[in-house]
Image (spheres, rainbow, N blue to C red):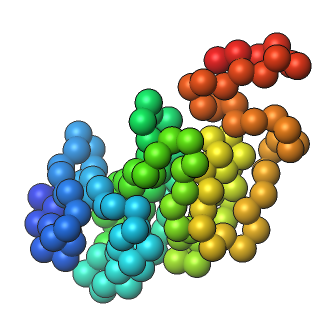
Amino acid sequence: MTNEELQACLAGEFPNAGVTLGKQYVEVVVKAEDLHATSEKLKMLPELSFDYLICLTGVDYAEKMQIVYHLESTKHRHVVVLKTNTADRLDPNVDTVSDVWQTAKYHEREVYDLLGVKFNHHKDLRRLFLEDGWGFPLRKDYKDEVRIVER
């Protein structure tokens, strides 16, 4: 399936999502409350079959956090970028997709550890690299007076 065909298929399956053709991949932007259901559908629909979460990352914007998922279908060999935004930046949270893609377990822990995004219903959400008390060093407003680290 070409990116144009994938875009048309996704636009038909997810009418409430923003589906655009990016420079390299088709991008799907969903509301945070639709993330889990969309993820399940992306994986389970036979014509899509996005069975592999390549990576998951967080982006700090002035008014929100954005979570970005790169997904691949190992059956059909196509890739999509799924994005969602948190409601706010101070207490960012979205639902976990670790029950959809097992690889999300550690990706979500990394985003939690470095940006402070909480993943609702994650079975083991705890810091991955840093000790408690460090704050969230990838946030744009991060300051650590003890270690004299400032971003």
Where does the image place residue 24, in percent across and percent down from the top left?
Answer: 27, 44
Locate residue 116 relative to residue 25 in the image: left or right: right
Residue at 75% from the left image edge and 36% from the top image edge: 135
Seen in the picture, residue 136 relative to 43 is either above or below; the reply is: above
Q: Residue at x 42, y 36 (%)?
A: 63
Above or below: residue 7 compared with residue 64: below
> Residue 34 at x, y = what percent?
36, 70
For the residue pair 111 and 121, the one nearer the viewer reads as 121
Q: Residue at x 62, y 56 (%)?
A: 118
Q: Is residue 58 visible?
A: yes
Q: In which quadrant of the rendered view does residue 104 lie?
A: bottom right
Specify the quadrant of the image occupied by residue 31.
bottom left
Looking at the image, residue 76 lies above or below residue 88? below
Q: Position of residue 33 (x, y in %)?
A: 40, 68
Q: Is residue 148 left or right of residue 63?
A: right
What residue sits 30% from the left and 86% below the top? 46
Q: Which image quarter holds the N terminus? A: bottom left
Question: Between residues 129 and 75, which one lies in front from this camera angle?
Answer: 129
Whether residue 50 is visible to the viewer of this picture, yes or no, is: no
| The C terminus sits in image quarter | top right
